[in-house]
Image (tube, grey):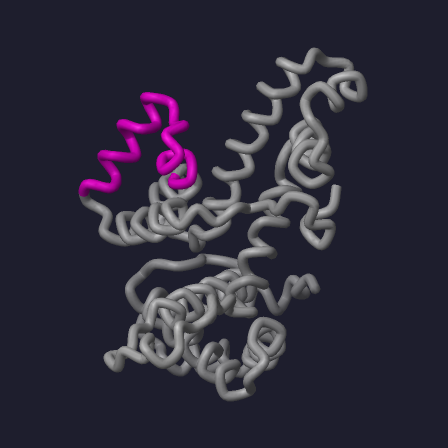
Amino acid sequence: MAIPAGEADADTELMAAVRAGDTGAYGVLYERHRSGARALAHGLVTDHADADDLVAETFAKVFATLRAGRGPLVAFRAYLYTTLRHVCYHRARRDRRLEFTDDLTRYDEGEPFLDPALDRMERTFAAQAFQALPDRWRDVLWRTEVEGASPAEVAPQLGLTPNAVAVLAHRAREGLRRLYLQQHVAVADPPECRWAGDRLGGHVRGRLAPRDAVRLRTHLSWCGDCRARLAEVTEINQGHYRPYRQRDHAGPQR
C-alpha cells in the first residue's frame, strides 16, 4: 500500500533527524511502522516469538545503519520491509547451519530437513527473478524447464531451429540465475554501493563487462560491506539451489 505524501515527507525528516543524533526521532519511526513490520513478520514466520524477534532485530539493524550515515534518504518503509525480509532469510540460513556436539548418528541416521520459512523465501526470490526476465526468456524456460519439452518440440512453437532454442534456453537460464542471486542483495547506500550491489550477481556468474568488472573489483578492495554481500551471494551460488523446478507447477507462473 502506498504511503501518503505527507507521511513519506515526515519519514524523510525523521530519518534526517536520526542521522543528526536524535534517537527520539527513531522512536517515532518505530511507532509509525511497527504494526506493518509485525504483519509482514507474521507472514514470514509462524511462531509469534520469532516474529517479534525478527521485528526487533530489523529495527535495530536499520537504526544502526541510519546512525552510521548510511541507509535510505527516502522511502523508510520500503527499506525497513526489505531489511526485514533479508534478516529473516539470514536467520533461517544461520539456523540451518547450526551444528550440535553430540553425535547421535549411531542411533538415528536422520532425515533431510527443509526449513519452511527459508523455502518460502527462496520461492519468493525465484518468482521475482522469473518475472523480471524478458517475455521470450520466460516462455522458453517455462516450456523446457517446467513442461519438460525438448528444444526440438519447442522449436516449431517459437519459430526457431532446435539449436536456436537450446541457445535461447541457455541464455534464459543464466539470466534467471543472475537475477535470482541479485534478489539476495540487500538495498545499499551510498550510490556507488548501490551500483556495486546491482552487479554482484553478474560478477559471481562471471558475466560482467570488463570495464564493470574492473570498477567493481576496485570498489570491493575498500568497501567491507559490499565484500560481505559478495560473500553471501557467492555462498548462495555455490549451494546450487535451482531457482526453478522442473514440472513444479506451484512455481512462478508465466
Which SS does the magenta portion mostly show?
helix
- Count up the numbered dots: 0
Residue 221: % across, % down: 19, 41
Is residue 11 in view from this perspective?
A: no
98 left or right, relative to 158: left
Q: Residue furthest right?
A: 157
Closer to us: 144 or 135: 144
From this view, report whether residue 176 is shown above or below residue 249: above
194 left or right, relative to 132: left
Quadrant of residue 106 in the image? bottom left
Residue at 39% x, 59% y is 71
Q: Residue furthest left?
A: 222
Q: Residue furthest front?
A: 106
The magenta span reads: 200-221
Quadrant of residue 165 in the image? top right
Residue 60 covered by magenta stretch:
no
Residue 207 covered by magenta stretch:
yes
Closer to us: 120 or 239: 239
Residue at 27% x, 78% y is 103
Residue 239: % across, % down: 40, 50
195 left or right, relative to 30: left
Is residue 144 in view from this perspective?
A: yes
Residue at 62% x, 73% y is 43
From this view, report whether residue 238 is shown above or below residue 136: below
Residue 93: % across, % down: 41, 65
Residue at 55% x, 25% y is 171
Closer to us: 199 or 135: 135
Q: Quadrant of the N terminus?
A: bottom right
